[in-house]
Image (cartoon, helix red, strand yellow):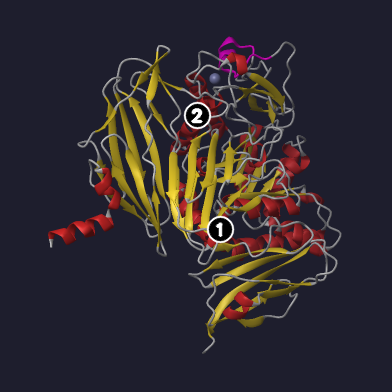
Amino acid sequence: MRKRAILVLLLVFPCWVCAAPALEPAVLSTSDVSLMFQGGDHAPKLATLSGIPEFRINNEAMEPLPASVEINGASVPLNWEINREASTHDKNHVLFVYESANPHLRLDWEWEARAGFGPVEHRITVKNLGNRELWLPLIDSLRLQWVITKESLQHFYVEKGADTPSAHGTHLENLSDGYHWIGKSSTYAFPAPGEAREIIPAEFVFDAEHPQTGWFAGLEFSGRTRISLERAGNKVTSVLGLNPEPGPFRTRLEAGGSFTTPTVFLGAFSGGPDGAANQLRPWVRAVLGNPLTWKEPHYPYTVNNSWGSGMQVDENLALRMIADSKELGLEMFHIDAGWFRGVGDWYPDPKKFPHGLAYIADAAHKQGLRFGIWVDWTQAALDTEPGALNVHDPKVRDWLVADTPPNWKPEEFKGQTVDVGVPAARDYFAKEVKRMVNDYRLDMLEQDGYLVAKGCTRDDHPHAPPDRSTTKVVHDWGSDFVVASNSTDVSYHAVRAYYNIYEQTRREHPGLLFEICNDGGRMVDFGSAAHGDYFSITDTYDPLSNRRAFYDTSFMLPAAMLESYVEKWPTPQPENFLYMLRSGMMGWLTIMTDTTVWSEQQHNAAREAIALYKQKLRPFVRNASLYHVSERPDGVHWDGLQYWDATRKSGVVYAFRGSTADEDVHSFVLHGLESDRKYKLHFQDATAPDALSTGRQLMDEGLKVRLVRALSSELVFIEEAGSTGK
Ligand SMILES: [Zn+2]
């Protein structure tokens, strides 16, 4: 009997016996993933990942805890020992604690399941318990070394829609032997010449065969990060964390200070990329999202934005737009750039707004609209009025990422970036953000430009000083960007400070919304999702770019958080007008064109389309599963998306016909329905009469849509209508 018991133990915990860990293995489970961890004497390990339906992979690598630190320029080796008393685990949280005696450091290796479903999160914190400053090397957020048994693996990732979405924003690649990939993310999203575009920092890896099971992982941080993925034979290695390039990375750990790796999430899924996305989106909403925002039944709001008139916004235009917003049924009025006295001088221009911004806020509120503004609050420039952030003020000069050259001038709405990671600058900006929210009676604050310093040349900031021999200053978009060995550490400190200001502001102003714009889609990541309420997902606003950016981004983030700005676009036919509007109606809708010049017919069409969005589309945008039922939009062929709410047993298909001259009818193969159920189809524009179909037909042959004009669209509502009786 005894022999048999040992055998069972070996089968259940094979590595527990051979690696002789000091702690009992710990398990964390949600309804989608189960992870097992081992706390060895000198290092912890993620041992296995299991998913539902049944699949399991083993991880080979022990966690490589930092081997040394630097003290007074000398490398000092570390010996880590587990602290059994301090280590804990329960059903939602695993904490393995390791300590180094000399220098005295504590390392917390933590995993947490914050929802009953979806992925599990992980972070590592190192605390300096000694009394000397020291320097830590790079600690990755997560290192995986899976031993795989499936041959045909695929890797899926998406680009940010930064600037203009590229022609290939969604990538599905074979993860074959010899595969080597690195995806990067930062707050800038400028790829260096010859480099790939930045990604939304997450990866999906799955077995190509049905039911397409696999794992996904992503980073909840907006600073400079990277994900690498490689395959050698039956080993798949992936590393997620801060970007070690251009390095060498090091970060200061003062006495009593601590360093925490960017949080990662790790989960399991089936059903390929849409399967992963339909798990990830509700998880982001439940765990990272702002519960107060989601509690509002009208989120995501419909918005009228002033940028259709560029910098020429003033009180008259604002009041006209507020009246027209009300008439159209929009819910927020948003003043974009152009309202301020100058860059870094975030007070209303008295010539444009003689009664100030609170006056405009009151006018909007009186019409039942919310009110928000654009601001690029970490910029300094040349204004000298009280309250302006001036680059020549000695205090401000010390906060800048670099000195400004002689005769330097700001651009129209960009100046020199202040390093928000400097504590005094952080405190100043926290007050400045609070002032604007209070004085201008804001319901929404849109951040733009580059709030987070890319690099910094200063020696006396909290981050590591740069290696001057390799430092480059690049002038782009009206600002100087410093690229140096310390760039990742600069972004680490600046992002933490920026998050801290937003957390504080949210506490003080519950219900305030933050739009993450950052030059249009450059800061689209899971750290931003945890600190903001919605994203500008691209900086190009024609119907095709809006649909491309939405197609890509909606694999990663809740649709309600994904804002499309609808700009002026040629619409000779009423169908083209609806096509333009609907291309921005799959997530958060912001109109960014002067609606007062619309014809009466266009006004009527827009009013109806907005009412339909609020009544019938928005509930799907908030809650429904989403299926990408076409190839990525190319503007020529047809494309479409399907929302399906399994609880309400209803959904909608957005169908778009591109410029193609020879395809009047297109079939969209649907997902998520039940084969033996009947479904009622309602074609919103009456391009076909209402009809009944079966789940089998819709999921095998597809939903047929007929559109006779190029650049037109249709919305097909689907409702379950009982059993087929078969
Ligand atoms: Zn700095």
- Left or right: 158, with 726 as reference point: right
Residue 621 position in % (x across, y down): 57, 59
Q: Which residue sits at x=66%, y=82%?
A: 691
Label 1, residues with CA under 10 Å away: few <14, some 14-19, many ≥20: many
- Left or right: 588, with 657 as reference point: left
Marks 1 and 2 in Cβ contact (< 8 Å): no
Q: Which residue sits at x=76%, y=43%?
A: 308
Image-quadrant location for residue 298? bottom right
Foreground pick, 130 / 385: 130
Between the C-alphas of marks 1 and 2, the distance is: 30 Å
Which element carries disc 2, helix, strand or loop?
helix
Label 2, residues with CA under 10 Å away: few <14, some 14-19, many ≥20: many
- Left or right: 305, with 260 as reference point: right
What's the residue type where badge 2 is placed? Tyr
Q: Is residue 396 above or below residue 204?
A: above
Q: Is residue 102 above or below residue 542?
A: above
Locate the N terminus by quadrant.
Answer: bottom left
What's the residue type where badge 1 is placed? Pro
Farthest-out residue, left:
1
* Residue range (magenta): 392-404
Q: Residue 30: in sight, yes or no? A: yes
Which element carries disc 1, helix, strand or loop?
helix
Looking at mark 2, is its residue's CB closer than 8 Å to ligand 1? Answer: no
- Left or right: 276, with 367 as reference point: left
Foreground pick, 200 / 644: 200
Q: Residue 220: in sight, yes or no? A: no
